[in-house]
Amino acid sequence: MNKLLKLTAVGALATIGLVGLANSAKAQLDESQLIPQQPREILACVNDGSGGVALVPQQIQEYASAYNSLYIVTDQTKVLQQGEPNIVFTKTLHSANPKGAYTPESRCQAIRDRVTNLKNSLGIESFAELSRIGKVNGQKVIAVNKVSRQTVVMTLSGENGKWKVAKYEVLPKFQAFVNSPFTPAATGPILE
């Protein structure tokens, strides 16, 4: 038992020492030691200046640092390009969720995460083709494949929740956004 306790203590001290060494190495880096990674596209939630939150595509450049041939990813990220808003959230929706109502910020973040995860798992073309308008819990939604609570990507409110608007205006904009986030919709973003 004592040997096990000693081994655990030694292991903990070694881990603390390595973390401290990595943090001090990170602090001693200058910009010439940063290695640019492959640029990538992400979706970001940004304030639109009028009280709403916009879902926008961004091309970002991340930087890593080399230390003893190990890559330590730093938190340095640079936005190379930002596209036009695809969806602008202005309304707070009621929710039975214990965390409270869906604010424009929380709605944007939830949809950003769902779209990113679905695009990664289904692929861009399949995701756009599988997008559907349907009804869940009495509300119009955009869902993937079969419309159910598990496949909802976005709940539509107000005018967007009307069948013709949802089917002929919102869904085509959503599908265009999924296919090519840096190409703004000809008729503007989805206003939610």
Image (cartoon, grey):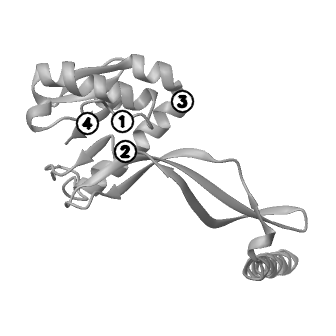
- Which one is nearer the viewer's eye here, 43 or 185? 185
Give the SS element for disc 4: loop
The reply to whether dot 3 and dot 4 touch (C-beta < 8 Å) is no
The disc, 3 or 2, on the residue closer to the chain's N-terminal end is 2
Q: Which residue is mark 2?
A: 84
Q: Residues within 10 Å of mark 2 (few under 14, many from 20)?
A: some
Q: Which residue sits furthest front?
A: 186
Relative placement, left or right, of 62 versus 106 is: right
Give the SS element for disc 1: loop
The reply to whether dot 1 and dot 4 touch (C-beta < 8 Å) is yes
Amino acid tagged 2: Glu
- Which one is nearer the viewer's eye here, 137 or 164? 164
Residue at image location 28% in from the left, 36% down from the top: 154
Q: Which residue is mark 4?
A: 188
Q: Kindly report the distance in space between the C-alpha atoms of the residues bearing marks 3 and 2.
A: 25 Å
Q: Kindly report the distance in space between the C-alpha atoms of the residues bearing marks 1 and 4.
A: 7 Å
The disc, 3 or 4, on the residue closer to the chain's N-terminal end is 3
Q: Which residue is mark 1?
A: 184
Residue 167's label in the rendered image is: none
The disc, 3 or 1, on the residue closer to the chain's N-terminal end is 3
Give the SS element for disc 2: loop
* 12 relative to 88, above or below: below
Q: Which residue is mark 3?
A: 121
The reply to whether dot 1 and dot 2 touch (C-beta < 8 Å) is yes
Q: Quadrant of residue 138?
A: top left
Q: In the image, which is nearer the foreground, mark 3 or mark 2?
A: 2
- Residue 55 screen position, x and y as percent: 35, 47
The answer to whether residue 148 is seen in the rendering is: no
Q: Quadrant of residue 103?
A: bottom left
Amino acid tagged 1: Pro
